Image: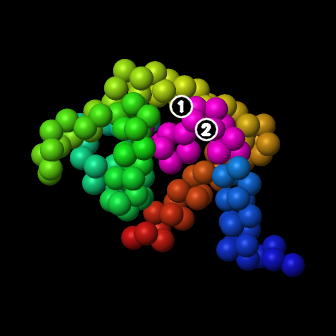
């Protein structure tokens, strides 16, 4: 009935994928958003919080909330105060980074097995291009 409806199909796909990502990241006691932010912080250690928001396409308030949770879990720590403060990944956070990287690999393998490698790669490329086109 809704085979030609972008909203319906994308929403349904998002729900399915979100469940797989939540299940994988739950093993690390993190949500996917927390995991991706921590991953970005290790990969891009000298960025400002605003830059992480731009990179992950999240609002500043969401980034702040995610960082607060990562601090409470001992995965990152704040250095300094006010506008001059920075957030640093702790040794525990770096250990989690390696686990996150493994989880991302597990999820990619799952998607490759479910969709087929070339189909999965093409889908990601098409979604990336659509996201970039719609946000310009």
Q: Residue 121's quadrant in the figure?
A: top right
Q: Secondary structure at mark 2?
A: helix
Residue 49, numbered label: none
Q: Position of residue 64 (x, y in %)?
A: 34, 53
Q: Residues within 10 Å of mark 2 (few under 14, many from 20)?
A: many
- How far apart marks 2 and 1 lie (CA) works out to 8 Å
Q: Position of residue 46 (x, y in %)?
A: 23, 37
Quadrant assignment for the N terminus: bottom right
Q: Residues within 10 Å of mark 1 (few under 14, many from 20)?
A: many
- Disc 1 target residue: 100
Residue 25, numbered label: 2
Residue closer to the observer: 52 or 123:
52
Would you say 120 lies left or right of 89 here? right
Magenta stretch?
20-38
**Most frequent secondary structure within the magenta stretch:** helix
Residue closer to the observer: 82 or 102:
82
Q: Is residue 102 above or below residue 125?
A: above
Residue 33: in magenta span = yes
Would you say 35 lies left or right of 1 here? left
Q: Are marks 2 and 1 in contact (CB under 8 Å)?
A: yes
Q: Nearer the viewer, mark 2 or mark 1?
A: 2
Residue at 48%, 71% (x, y): give it: 134
Q: Position of residue 18 (x, y in %)?
A: 66, 52
Q: Residue furthest front?
A: 72
- Ranked by sequence position, the earlier of labels 2 and 1 is 2
Residue 60: in magenta span = no
| Residue 75 can be seen, yes or no | yes
Residue at 44%, 34% (x, y): give it: 73
């Amino acid at each position: 009935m809704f085979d030609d409806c972008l909203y319906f199909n994308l929403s349904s796909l998002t729900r399915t994928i979100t469940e797989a990502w939540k299940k994988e990241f739950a093993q690390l006691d993190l949500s996917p958003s927390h995991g991706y932010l921590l991953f970005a912080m290790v990969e891009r250690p000298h960025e400002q919080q605003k830059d992480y928001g731009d990179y992950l396409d999240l609002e500043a308030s969401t980034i702040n909330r995610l960082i607060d949770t990562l601090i409470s879990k001992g995965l990152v720590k704040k250095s300094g105060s006010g506008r001059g403060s920075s957030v640093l990944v702790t040794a525990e956070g770096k250990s989690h980074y390696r686990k996150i990287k493994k989880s991302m690999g597990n999820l990619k393998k799952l998607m490759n097995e479910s969709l087929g490698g070339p189909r999965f790669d093409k889908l990601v490329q098409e979604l990336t291009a659509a996201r970039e086109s719609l946000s310009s």
